[in-house]
Image (cartoon, rainbow, N blue to C red):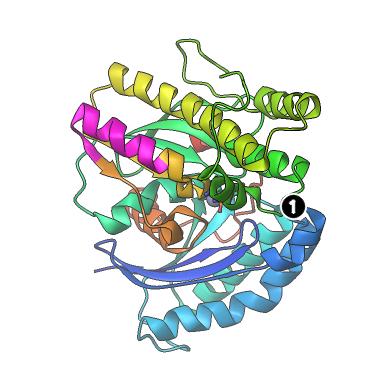
Amino acid sequence: MSVVLGIETSCDETAAAVVDGNYRVRSSVIESSIDQHRAFGGVVPELAGRAHVTTLGPVVARALANAGLDAHHPAIDAVAVTSGPGLIGSLLVGLSAAKAYALGWGVPFVGVNHLEGHLFAPLLEQPDLAWPVLTLLVSGGHSMIVLQSGPGQHEVLGETIDDAAGEAYDKVARWLGLGYPGGPEIDRLAQRGDATALKLPVSMTGPDFDLSFSGLKTAVVRATEKHHEVALGDVAASFQAAVAEQLLRKLRHAMERYDVRGVALAGGVAANSALRAGVRSLADGFAVACHLPTLELCTDNAAMIAAAGLYRFGADGPSPFNLSASPNWQLVDVS
Ligand code: KG4
Ligand code: ZN
């Protein structure tokens, strides 16, 4: 049975994990440099890259130790690492380290697409899940609806034409004077707010599966400039309802079009309470399985990278040692 060490350093999380051939997570360690970025209202690439340099070694050592593996001669069969998309400096730290570990231990290494990694998260909790599955992949950098006919078999049905959903949360939070990242705070405030307080447009009501959030962000700015009296919680609730309505409407539309056996959420915005509740009720309505990975598997982690690496290694073999980082690697370009 193959055992894979996964490494993830595409943004501000420094993560390492050990996953076995049955997609069982033997260890998963996640550190983040987010505290260094808060003051800037977003991830500062140079700071993120430097943080990976100091954090990655100890994180890998803990992942190996937690999996009961020897630090110097671990019984692993391959090293999987995110080689894109992401911040170039951050990707290069993980990629260089993965190559060094693989060379030192005499095992192959495999470069993994970060977005494909997110798609493997549900499998880590339910390795025998029934396909096909429709996945809403929503994070700070990406928003797309993906039809998966099996592990590693994916078709992007539609994606955002401007901002990602998480990016919209972060921008609106910044406008409202809330901290970074904005998603968790807006979600928390929205619980106590009135979602009908602000009239906000629901974008992209056409028959395709593309998404858009920049108009909504502008609408929040305009509406709050005009209606100073509306409470913060009500603004948060109105914005959250408009985001969820667009995403859930598109997902419902995709479920009507495609005969699937499950629906899944992936990416950091999958932590959102309105989305989780909406996807659960959609799945119930269509009588299909609902895959909502635990939050630690929704946000950036290395277990999902190890899982995708396990699949890619089996399907395509190892990557060449001259593989370089691909900061803009699209999911549609994954073989
Ligand atoms: O996947 P992720 O950890 O990092 C990448 O972007 O790859 O996602 C982070 C994003 C941030 O934009 C953050 O504001 C958003 O996920 N987020 C949320 C919630 N928790 C995190 N957005 C809405 N509601 C939440 N509860
Ligand atoms: Zn991500």
Q: Does 57 appear above or below 158?
A: below
Q: Residue at x 73, y 55 (%)?
A: 43
Give whichever of 322, 250 is nearer the camera. 250
Image location of residue 306, percent across then percent down? 41, 62
Question: Do we see residue 104 in this rendering?
Answer: no
Q: Secondary structure at mark 1?
A: loop
Quadrant showing the C terminus: top left
Residue 64 lies in the magenta-colored region: no
Give whichever of 99, 290 is nearer the camera. 290
Question: Do we see residue 307 in this rendering?
Answer: yes
Q: Residue at x 54, y 46 (%)?
A: 187
Image location of residue 155, percent across then percent down? 40, 29
Q: Residue at x 72, y 50 (%)?
A: 178
Give whichever of 46, 247 is nearer the camera. 247
**Disc 1 CB within 8 Å of nearest ligand 1 atom:** no
Q: Quadrant of residue 162?
A: top right
Quadrant showing the N terminus: bottom left
- The kind of secondary structure the magenta stretch mainly shows is helix
Image location of residue 307, percent across then percent down? 37, 58
Horizontal side of residue 2 vs 246, given as left or right? left
Q: Which region shows up in magenta?
A: 276-289
The mark total stands at: 1
Q: Quadrant of residue 157?
A: top left
Horizontal side of residue 245 vs 257, given as left or right? right
Image location of residue 148, percent across then percent down? 33, 35
Tell me which amino acid carries mark 1: Gly
Residue where numbered disc 1 is placed: 42
Q: Residue at x 41, y 89 (%)?
A: 70
